[in-house]
């Protein structure tokens, strides 16, 4: 059986990202160092969206809700990359929070993340560099904008996300996703 036959059988005639039953093409996932199975079957809508410089249509990508649980590593990695690009949308960030990749897949996923993000460095109150997924402790009672609660000093915030603004991180406090100033947190 050729590679293509294997792929056709695996996808069952449906786009591996959005499930469309339209004609499919093989898509090799770029930025896949040392990976064996990087190909997947995608529909023309997904392929158009994936071409460089194309703005993502967030409505189309709600399909990642399902495809991020694919058993195909390359599909999961691509889902992660797309969710990352869409992570200013709450639903995408929520999915990203749920999508757990093992270390190797995480590295694979990040190999394709845009390099622009690297330019922004987030530092805590002591100047320690913060990275997505870090845990921090809030060092001062903070009134949370748009809510009635106070994020108390000493509150641990796990699995933070970085934003484009080097002074802002995001994390969940009291079950709500909030923006926190980096100068009020300490890496733990
Ligand atoms: Zn598709």
Image (cartoon, rainbow, N blue to C red):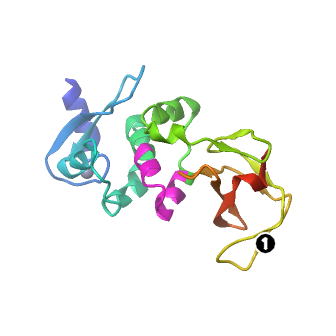
Q: Which residue is mark 1?
A: 150
Q: Position of residue 122 (x, y in %)?
A: 64, 44
* Marker count (numbered): 1
Q: Residues within 10 Å of mark 1 (few under 14, many from 20)?
A: some
Look at the picture and state if 72 lies above or below 93: above
Residue 4 sits inside the magenta stretch: no
Q: Position of residue 126 (x, y in %)?
A: 80, 43
Residue sitting at 66 percent across and 49 percent down? Answer: 159
Tell me, yes or no, if residue 11 can be seen here: yes
Relative placement, left or right, of 85 versus 10 is right
Q: Position of residue 40 (x, y in %)?
A: 29, 37
Relative placement, left or right, of 50 versus 182 is left
Look at the image and tell me in which quarter the C terminus lies.
top right
Q: Position of residue 170 (x, y in %)?
A: 63, 57
Among the 4 quarters of the image, the one containing residue 130:
top right
Residue sitting at 75 percent across and 40 percent down? Answer: 127
The residue at the far left in this view is: 23
Look at the picture and state if 6 lies above or below 52: above
Among the 4 quarters of the image, the one containing residue 36:
top left
Relative placement, left or right, of 82 versus 106 is left
Element marked by disc 1: strand
Residue sitting at 70 percent across and 52 percent down? Answer: 182
Look at the image and tell me in which quarter the N terminus lies.
top left
Secondary structure mostly seen in the magenta stretch: helix
Residue toward you, 74 or 181: 181
Tell me, yes or no, if residue 14 can be seen here: no
The residue at the far bottom in this view is: 148
Residue 86 sits inside the magenta stretch: yes
Label 1 residue near ligand 1, CB within 8 Å: no
* Highlighted range, magenta: 81-96
């Amino acid at each position: 059986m050729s590679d293509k036959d294997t792929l056709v059988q695996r996808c069952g005639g449906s786009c591996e990202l959005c499930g469309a039953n339209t004609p499919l093409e093989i898509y090799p996932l770029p930025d896949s160092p040392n990976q064996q199975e990087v190909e997947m079957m995608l529909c023309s809508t997904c392929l158009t969206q994936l071409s460089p410089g194309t703005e993502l249509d967030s409505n189309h990508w709600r399909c990642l809700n399902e495809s991020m649980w694919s058993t195909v590593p390359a599909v999961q990695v691509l889902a992660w990359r797309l969710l990352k690009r869409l992570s200013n949308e709450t639903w995408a960030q929520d999915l990203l929070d749920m999508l757990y990749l093992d270390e190797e897949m995480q590295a694979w996923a990040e190999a394709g993340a845009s390099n622009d993000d690297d330019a922004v460095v987030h530092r805590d109150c002591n100047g320690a560099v913060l990275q997505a997924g870090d845990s921090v402790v809030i060092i001062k009672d903070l009134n949370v904008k748009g809510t009635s609660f106070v994020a108390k000093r000493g509150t641990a915030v796990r699995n933070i996300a970085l934003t484009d603004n080097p002074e802002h991180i995001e994390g969940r406090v009291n079950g709500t996703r909030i923006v926190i100033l980096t100068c009020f947190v300490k890496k733990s």
